[in-house]
Image (tube, rainbow, N blue to C red):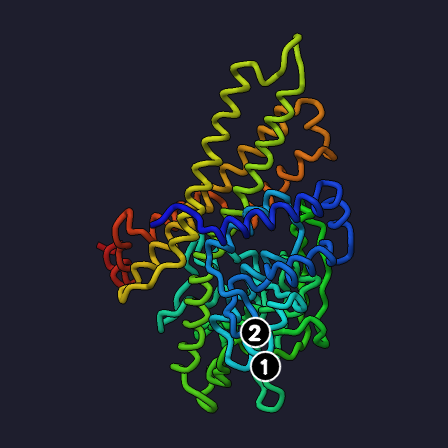
Amino acid sequence: MDAAFTEEQDQIRRTVRELLRERCDTDAVKAAVRTAPGHDTALWRLLARQLGLSGLALPEEYGGAGCGAVEQALVCEEAGRALLPSPLLATAVLGAPLIARLGAGAQRAALLPGIAAGELTAALAVPGGALPEALGLTGAPAETAGGARNGWAGGGRAGGVQARHDAGTGWRLYGQVDQVLDGHSAGVLLVAARTGGYTRGRTLLFVVPGDTAGLTRTRLTALDETRPQARIELRNVVAEPLGEDPGRAAVGTADGGTDGDADGAAARVADGLVHLGATAAAHLAAEAVGVADAALTRTVAYVREREQFGRPVGSFQAVKHRLADVYVKVQAARSAAYYAAWATGGTTAPDGREDREAAVAGGLALAQALEAQRAAAAEAVQLHGGLGFTWEHDAHLAFKRAASDELLFGPVHRLRARAAERGGLFGARPAAVPAQATAAAVAV
């Protein structure tokens, strides 16, 4: 691993930082989150069209820049430093990579150029607050007999979203999804829905344009206004599967396909989400590092100026120690985030070794970054004294982001537990004991 950034990567970081310093100060952030989209649309167009941030990691054949995970991580870090409210996470980190990896040729050609040009935004809708689980960050969803990770999208009496296939009209979606990042303004939604019955349930992703009939989107009141969230309600909504259509096989009927077709489609979706989880974790970690670093910088500047007992607050040894602890956490989290971003760009070995390394590195980096973000935000509130405790103070922007991120993508202990499991730290999991054997043992 070459730990030094290239000249191009340094230039990307400097350009984004300078632009956000000019256009996205604290007052601009507070004004942007109170608009209907929840972000400054003019600034997003500038970032997407002139700097190419919306398509930074997309292939050049679709209008993207063809950069890698490291460049995307640097951009996310600067976005976090400015607490930028934008569709960057929902579109560039979650939505676009899924379309590029799982979409059929026609879907990629129809959607990716618009995303790369900044004309289209995307959002991933996963029911039941199961986003970190679906991405393989905090646990593995239940497996079907075919080995595919399915059933976690709910549906029917379990809530979530149910997909039904009709021979005449195709696929239709019913259900509700809460906490969809930028779901109220996205031009296209990728909705996880359950197909089939209880015993043969499978989870697929469906493409739903934002203006589809029967789709209702409501922006929710969120703890962190810089991460807008929405409730998505689907009532007989026409949709198409992301990727090849498994047809009626996905709903448990033999005509129009086989169970193997449906299991294969569901397995591709599950694998695609897990692969996305590794890169998304690295980018989220970099973003959290940016938030933490900015909070630490502002706090250090404040304690240098604020005087108590005739001397700057920052001159007291106890304050120095607390800030030094935060500094160590931030620097360690930054190193972990950069390594995770580098690991996701590796070449997959035949046994999947690189994928496992990336998944473990991503989960651990995200856990460490969330901890650093929480520590930096908490110390910012504490060391700003009575001023920092006021809800309107700038320190609370970072505090809300830290709390929101851990609710959306954590908790930290589950991220670490899953990373340890995937890395084989505790050895292979024991095989499940058949129910008959368990009953016999109890009888004896």
Q: Locate residue 404, reporting x and y percent.
A: 60, 45
**Which label was assigned to residue 130?**
none
Residue linked to disc 1: 171
What residue is drawn where x is 72% and y is 68%?
Answer: 216
Q: Position of residue 356 (x, y in %)?
A: 34, 57
Dot 2 or dot 1: first in sequence order is: 1
Does residue 415 appear anywhere in the picture? no
Which of 338 and 413 lies nearest the eye of the viewer? 338
> What is the residue that sits farthest to the top in this orientation?
310
Q: Amino acid at mark 2?
A: Phe
In terms of image quadrants, where is residue 148?
A: bottom left
Give the amino acid at mark 1. Answer: Trp
Left or right: 352 in relation to 377: left
Q: Which mark is residue 206?
A: 2
Is residue 392 visible to the viewer in this orientation of the structure?
yes
Drawn side of residue 440 relative to residue 123, left or right: left
Query: In this picture, is 22 found above or below 8?
Result: above
